[in-house]
Image (tube, rainbow, N blue to C red):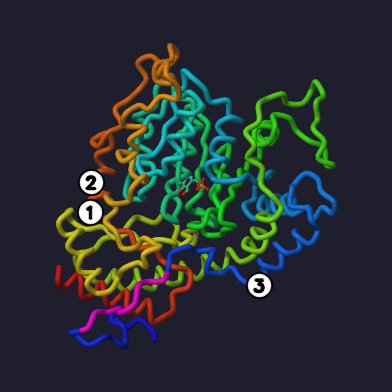
Amino acid sequence: MRVEEGGRTGKTKSPGSPARTEPLPLEFPGAHWLDEEEVQAAARVLRARSPFRYYGPDMQDEVRSFEEEFARFVGARYALAVSSGTGALFTALSALEVGPGQEVIIPAYLWVSIASAVVCHGAIPVLADIDDTFCLDPADVERRITPRTRGIIMAHMSGAPGDVKAIQAIARRHGLFLLEDCAQCVGGSVDGQSVGTFGDVGIFSFQLNKNITAGEGGCLVTSDERLQERAVAWHDLGYCRDRAGRLLLEANGPHLWGRGYRMDELRAAVLRVQLRKLPLVTAAMRASKYRIRQALEALPGVGFRRILDPAGDTGAFLITVYPDAGRARAVQQALRAEGLVARPEGINNIVMADWGLHLYYNNLSLVEHAPLEPSGFPWSAPQNRGLARRYGKGACPRADDLFERSLLLAIPSCLRRKDEDEIIQAFERALARA
Ligand SMILES: Cc1ncc(COP(=O)(O)O)c(C=O)c1O
């Protein structure tokens, strides 16, 4: 069934009954595509009795192969697989030598791990506002730069890239590092260039909510040899290793501290299969999202997140924007009445103000300046004197406003045309009624 003029779908439910009668499929994009191939890949590792990446009785080299394949996929010189996206953030900041006396710019729309990684390195996070891309606003980033700024963490949120070329230009102009957090945008790109390759380092997550998954997992990419060497040491035991997995303790290699964030062979085997499926996963979400969005564009009273390059949008989320908070809430309630609800295990069709730790002001550890130890470090450290900011609501007014009047709809990677038709019909009715 094709979308007809004006966004009307060919077949619709009768006026009395809701557009949907069963919950939306769960959002977990990569998980819908897990099948016998991943089972066989994991079994191969177990049969070889070699689930550790650096040595074992019958090495399958799954982690190293995944790193080579992922680096090729994004177009970076190096990839380092780690145990989580949070682990990748910590490893990246350690490799970049972030520490006390430094400020790191972070976005108002984020995940708690970003602030955590900065604070746990003894540095001070500085919030910058978002714009209608729902990612960093380049103009606000420029305003927040001080002589203490060391770098910028840009997160490509909710499946689509932000204005990374503008942020890259700012970072270069001011001599700052740029770390791209691509946890929510695995497979995304801008003008054909993969996210994660515009800055010094890119990080990715393979946790269950992400575009490919092994339950947990992460990766760091860079084309800088020194950063890669430092990251390899930090993610493991503080030293590099030779191909046989032996630690290199020579004087000319890195002597650092290790965090123990290694990826294991089981998850790498699964991720290698998932990576081959990634273009199919994102193509499915993108097709569903843009079919729905095209239909909604014909309706009055609804706006959309600005997407810089639809071809590089992974399609995982549709964000609709309304004139005010009351109207957003009314449309969300009306959509619920039309059956746009998630199963209990998932989250879908929410006002973004209800999006928990993705909103800076819900991070109470940040708002309350939670210390790492009783001395009050890092907030109290002499090098950080006078650098701590206010992180409560009001620090980023544009984000506060957008969160209140925007709805987030996850686009599951397994939607059928019938599901898309019902979502479109639910919006048509909700917008007419709200
Ligand atoms: C933007 C962002 N950064 C980092 C992470 C952390 O990834 P992980 O859950 O794999 O630690 C997430 C996870 O949701 C995220 O959304």
Q: Residues within 10 Å of mark 3 (few under 14, many from 20)?
A: few
Q: Quadrant of the C terminus?
A: bottom left
Indicate the amino acid at tag 1.
Answer: Arg
Mark number for residue 313?
none
Between the C-alphas of marks 1 and 2, the distance is 7 Å
Question: Which SS does the magenta portion mostly show?
Answer: loop
Q: Which residue is mark 3?
A: 36
**Helix, strand or loop status at disc 3:** helix
* Above or below 348: residue 254: above
Decide: marks 1, 2 in contact (CB < 8 A)? yes
Q: Nearer the viewer, residue 101 or 222?
A: 101
Residue at disc 2, CB closer than 8 Å to ligand 1: no
Confirm if mark 1 falls within 8 A of ligand 1: no
Residue drawn at point x = 31 percent, y = 88 percent: 11
Q: Residues within 10 Å of mark 1 (few under 14, many from 20)?
A: many
Residue 348, position as x, y percentages in the image: 34, 62
Q: Which residues are magenta?
A: 17-25
Q: State the residue position of label 1.
A: 405
The spot of residue 298 in percent (x, y) is 26, 72
Q: Secondary structure at mark 1?
A: loop
- Quarter that holds the N terminus: bottom left
Amino acid, disc 3: Glu
- Based on the displayed image, in which of its 4 quarters is residue 226 positioned? top right
Q: Amino acid at mark 2?
A: Asp
Does dot 2 land on a helix, a strand or a loop?
helix
Q: Which residue is mark 2?
A: 401
Residue lying at 24% horizontally and 74% vertically, measured from the top left: 338
